[in-house]
Image (cartoon, grey):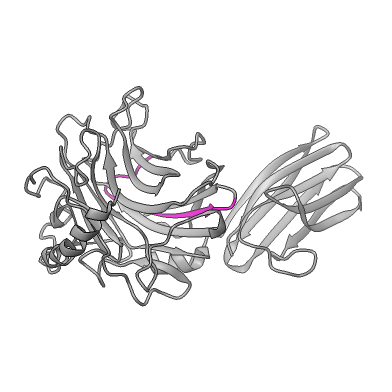
Amino acid sequence: MMTKGNVIRNNLAGACLVAVIEAWKGFAATAAGPDASKMCSAVAAGNYDVYHLPAITHPPAGVSAFIDWAKLPSNGGWSGAQIMDSCRYHPDGFLTWHGKAAARIEVQPNDDPLNLGAGSERAEMMGLQDSTGMQINETSASGTVYYATSYYFPSTWDGTFLKGNSNSWSFVWQFYGWQGFAASRGYAADPAAQKYWFGGISTAFSDGGNITKGLWTDFVFMVNWGTGHLSVWRRNEGLTAFTLVLDANGPAVTGSYYVKQGLYRGGDVSGRTDVLWVGPTARGSTFSSVELAAFGTNNGTGTARSIPLKVNSEAFLIKVIEAGQHNLINLSYNIPYASGVTIGIYDARGRLIRRLIDENLQAGSYKTGWDGRDGYGIPALPGMYLIRMKSGTADISQKIVLLE
């Protein structure tokens, strides 16, 4: 927490921190790969957090906050730093697989920059801020927001989140006060079973969530701050398309929250030093804007999948193509027998947005689509919707996500 005294002290310390971190500006990795060994010196206990750091003044189009380690090596554009010294969080010359500057993060035992005592080891940057330097806090009024970032975990990564151990956790992203993004072995005893997962949400990643060590992984988070709904897309290094790996409801949004990124871990690590890398980070109102800013790509999800549905014990097959950049949902469906069929688009609260089909159909194959607009021709807001299909007494829904 930042007290009034800390504000005065940190205003004085901020310039010193920037000057010290600038010393790392020209540093480049000399080995073929990143150096994941312990490299930072021990620092005496104390309070080392600083705030009111410079912002990226000209973020990319459509992006409300941007972290760029090439433009601002001192802090990337974050409003605050909770680190023991500049070595703990700095760009070291290692690039993301998209050629973007990345920051190296190192946390040693007893790294407690907030001086809070046991169970507060960390190296975190905090507070996305707009181009004027105003910190962005999320509330229920924030609406639907997208965040893009990337992580690289070396082969030695062994994050922990041990069952029954209140002093063991490894969060690498926090919506502080709401929930956090963990990279750890979870409740598994096998240290090789390192996984991504969101604390506060019991739903597991649909792809298993396994961390791919030694390669970059891109993420896009979408949060509907009005409802607390969270969607997560993942793309491993070398792939083009993103995969929707989590689509679930999070805790209710009742306060004000801000973003933190780095490593926040409990103290039960048996003397281990943890090292990871993070790439650029973007906040914006559309998937495509944050994807382009953080990764330099514009691929969207473009995911096609077949969904087998059951109506009166007969198989209906609906194919859904999510082309988020064009607000287009294409559907093809098979009717096994003559039936009255209605298909509509509903919002997350169950309200009808657009009726697509309402007629008696003969057995056969049919197609329809949704252009992302409601029944009045007005573009629907980004977020989760339901394709709802009714036939006789059957009533079936399938989640879809409108990206922009």
> Residue 134 at x, y = what percent?
38, 67
Q: Is residue 383 above or below residue 165?
A: below
> Residue 66 at x, y = what percent?
37, 67
109 or 15: nearer the viewer: 15
> Residue 397 at x, y = what percent?
72, 43
> Residue 186 at x, y = what percent?
36, 31
The quarter of the rendered structure image containing the C terminus is bottom right
273 or 155: nearer the viewer: 273
257 or 393: nearer the viewer: 257
> Seen from this angle, which residue lies furthest front?
4
Residue at 83% in and 37% down: 394
Q: Residue 135 falls in which quadrant of the image?
A: bottom left
Q: Is residue 197 left or right of residue 303?
A: left
Q: Is residue 74 above or below residue 363?
A: below
Q: How many marks?
A: 0
Residue 295 can be seen in this image: no
Residue at 10% in and 60% down: 30
Residue 35: say if magenta.
no
Residue 34 can be seen in this image: yes
1 or 207: nearer the viewer: 1
Q: Is residue 310 above or below residue 145?
A: above
Q: Is residue 95 left or right of residue 252?
A: left
Question: What range is drawn magenta here?
Answer: 210-226
Q: Is residue 46 above or below residue 356?
A: above
Q: Is residue 289 left or right of residue 295?
A: right
Residue at 22% in and 29% down: 268
